[in-house]
């Protein structure tokens, strides 16, 4: 499920970012109308965030940091472009759900909370790093996110070459 969310919404983010990159003057003018500070700097930043972030989202690389940045981007989109829908989340949830940023925000929050999933570059990197030893025979061992001390007898037998 996470793979499908990442692939589809990552592609959507990349596509919108690509479109914004090719229309930066219009995007900067739109940001200025929304009273977003420094529209000339924010337009290329947000465009690159959506484009590159969408690609990384699809790959499942740096998933949680990218999902956090994209979720922040969508919260700002709600606050500035769909403010009425944003403030009506409790009084009229339907208006909140049909606003343009909703599905982008939902996908970003899903990956932020649950991670990239099994089929991602993040998982491949984690599995690779998990299999690597520290090189120190008497050092602590990381197992399931907890440091486990090696037993003294195991350390002695390893040092003795048994």
Image (cartoon, helix red, strand yellow):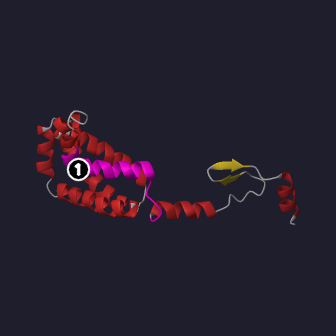
| Residue 89 seen in the figure | yes
| Residue 36 seen in the figure | no
At horizontal 58% and vertical 61% (from top left) the residue drawn is: 129
Residue beneath disc 1: 44
Residue 138 image offset from top left, x and y in percent: 78, 54
Please report the bounds of the magenta region as a residue range.
97-119
The image quadrant where one finds the N terminus is bottom left
State how many labels appear: 1
At horizontal 61% and vertical 60% (from top left) the residue drawn is: 130
The relative height of residue 109 versus residue 14 in the rendered view (above or below) is above
**Front residue (pair 126, 85):** 85
Residue 35 image offset from top left, x and y in percent: 16, 35
Instruction: Estimate how packed mark 1 is, as few (under 14), some (14 to 19) or many (20 or more) residues with alpha carbons within 10 Å.
Output: many
- Give the side of residue 87 with respect to residue 126, left or right: left
Residue 45 image offset from top left, x and y in percent: 26, 48
Q: Main secondary structure of the magenta part?
A: helix
- Give the side of residue 20 with respect to residue 9, left or right: left
Q: Residue 58 lies in magenta, yes or no?
A: no
Q: Residue 111 lies in magenta, yes or no?
A: yes
Residue 91 falls in image quadrant: top left
Residue 158 falls in image quadrant: bottom right
The relative height of residue 34 versus residue 128 in the rendered view (above or below) is above
Residue 41 image offset from top left, x and y in percent: 22, 44
**Front residue (pair 70, 8):** 8
The image quadrant where one finds the C terminus is bottom right
SS label for mark 1: helix
At horizontal 36% and vertical 58% (from top left) the residue drawn is: 57
């Amino acid at each position: 499920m996470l793979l499908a969310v990442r692939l589809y919404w990552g592609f959507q983010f990349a596509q919108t970012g690509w479109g914004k990159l090719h229309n930066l003057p219009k995007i900067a003018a739109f940001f200025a109308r929304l009273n977003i500070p420094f529209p000339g700097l924010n337009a290329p930043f947000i465009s690159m965030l959506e484009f590159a972030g969408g690609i990384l989202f699809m790959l499942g690389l740096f998933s949680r940091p990218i999902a956090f940045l994209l979720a922040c981007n969508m919260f700002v989109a709600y606050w500035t472009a769909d403010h009425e829908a944003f403030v009506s989340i409790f009084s009229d949830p339907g208006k909140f759900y049909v606003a343009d940023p909703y599905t982008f925000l939902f996908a970003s929050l899903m990956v932020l909370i649950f991670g990239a999933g099994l089929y991602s570059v993040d998982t491949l990197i984690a599995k690779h790093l998990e299999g690597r030893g520290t090189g120190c025979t008497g050092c602590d061992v990381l197992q399931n996110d907890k440091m486990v001390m090696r037993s003294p007898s195991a350390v002695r037998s390893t040092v003795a070459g048994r």
